[in-house]
Amino acid sequence: MDFAPIWDRLSQNIQALPQSTLLMAAVAAMAVGVIGSLVVRFSPRVGRFLRSASTLGLMGILVLVVLQVSRLDPRFEMAVPELGLPQQVVEGHETRVPMARDGHFWLRAEVNGVPARFLVDTGATLTAVSSDTAKRADLTPRRAGIPIRMQTANGMVAAQLTEIDDMRFGNVAAHGIDAIIAPGLGPTNVIGMNLLSRLSSWRVENNVLILVPHHPQPAAQAD
């Protein structure tokens, strides 16, 4: 049996551990609990305090993970600005996107004022930007983001959560949108269901994708 692929995947996961603040905090909380269990024999009060702190820490981390997963799932309408995560808002008039020759819907958008080309993918859960787009738009990874792994043609790759403060295309303006920085996608940027689900409606008619947000916005200039 060839263990090389298994070892490579394990190595990638281990290397990704320090990049997740939440995961490192969970490890630290569990370590405090273990220390508390050892200390309780010699100092019951200190041991119980450490174990209680460990339990509370793990509960807090679990709450943060649940809230973040809720934001990433388009079936939920949760926004948690009190935890430092911006409310996700999409507004504007109807925008029409004709189908391209390759059978996909492509549009020109601005991410924090930086122009970028996006593929509209109704099968993608999250909006994704390439490393180049993230750099040009000054998008930085969310330090307390949950770890993201995604399947690509080259296998599993690590992706980093970020937030798009301002994204515009056609008559649509989106603010505080969760996204991932996905180096495995190459130069491709993707608009996923976490943005589309916040529109008033979207549909395809005669090979034209029609996006209908909630509130009117001035039309963005065509590239």
Image: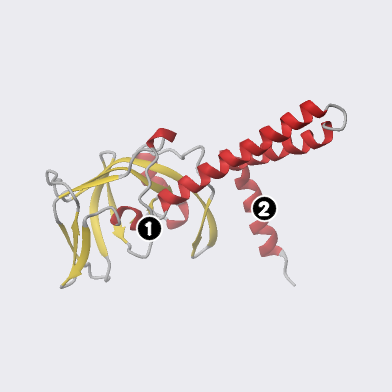
Q: Position of residue 61 (x, y in %)?
A: 57, 41
Q: Position of residue 191 (x, y in %)?
A: 32, 55
Q: Earlier in the sequence, mark 1 or mark 2?
A: 2
Which numbered tag is attached to residue 11? 2
Q: Nearer the viewer, mark 1 or mark 2?
A: 1
Which amino acid, mark 1? Arg
- For the N terminus, which image quadrant? bottom right
Check the image and report above or below for 43 versus 108.
Answer: above
Q: Position of residue 116 (x, y in %)?
A: 28, 49
Q: Which residue is mark 1?
A: 75
Q: Which residue is located at x 60 percent, y 47 percent?
A: 16
Q: Which residue is located at x 68 percent, y 63 percent?
A: 6
Check the image and report above or below for 162 versus 101.
Answer: above
Q: Is residue 72 left or right of residue 62?
A: left
Q: Quadrant of residue 185?
A: bottom left
Which amino acid, mark 2? Ser
Q: Position of residue 31 (x, y in %)?
A: 73, 37
